[in-house]
Image: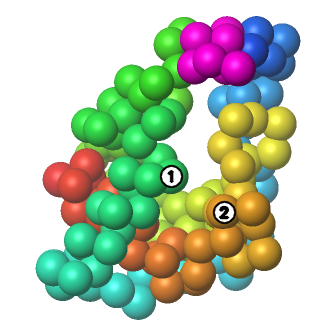
Amino acid sequence: MDLRTIKTAIIAFALAVPMSVMAGEGEVPNEYTTMKNPFNGSDKSVIERGEYIYSKKCVKCHGEKGDGAGLIEGITMPVFNKEFFSAKEDGYLFWHVKNGVSDSLMPSYGPGSDDNLSVNDIWKAVAFIRERFGK
C-alpha cells in the first residue's frame, strides 16, 4: 500500500467520524489536573529528548510548528500556542499523551500501549511542546 492510499484511507475514516467527536477531549481525572511536570523545560537534555519524541510521534499530526499542519490534509489538530497552553495544566497534557483521546485520531502513547513511551518520556515531550510552542 502506498502513502497516498494510506492518507486517503485515513481521511475517509476521519470524515466518517463527526468533527465534534474528534474535537472532544474527554474527561481528565481530577488527580491529573494538579500534576506538575517533574522535568524543567530549561534543561537541555530534557528538551532534546522531548524534541526527539515529538519528531517521531507527534509531528505527523500536529506539524513541525505545532500549528496542526501535519501530514494528514483536511484534518484539523489542536494548535500548540501560548493560548492553548495557558489554559492547560501539565497533568491535562500528560493524561492525553498517555491515554490518547477517545473517538479521535489521538492514540495512547503511555506504558503498555503500542507506542509504549515511559512516564518520563511523556513528561519530557510535554516539557518540549510547552517550551517550543507555548511562549
Callout 2: few (<14), some (14-19), or many (20+) C-alpha neighbours within 10 Å? Answer: few
Apparent side of residue 16 relative to residue 115 in the rendered image (left or right): right
The span shown in magenta is 1-8
Q: Which residue is drawn at 72% across and 28% down?
A: 22
Q: Residue at x 39, y 75 (%)?
A: 124
Q: Does the magenta stretch include residue 4?
A: yes
Q: Mark 1 points at which residue?
A: 57
Most extreme residue toward the bottom, as rendered? 38
Q: Where is residue 76 in the image (x, y as percent from the top left)?
A: 53, 21
Q: Position of residue 84 (x, y in %)?
A: 39, 44
Q: Distance between the residues labelled 1 and 2?
A: 8 Å
Q: Tell me which amino acid carries mark 1.
A: Lys
**Foreground of the two, 111 or 76:** 111
For the N terminus, which image quadrant? Answer: top right
Q: Does the magenta stretch include residue 54?
A: no
Q: Quadrant of residue 125?
A: bottom left
**Foreground of the two, 97 or 26:** 97
Q: Tell me which amino acid carries mark 2.
A: Asp
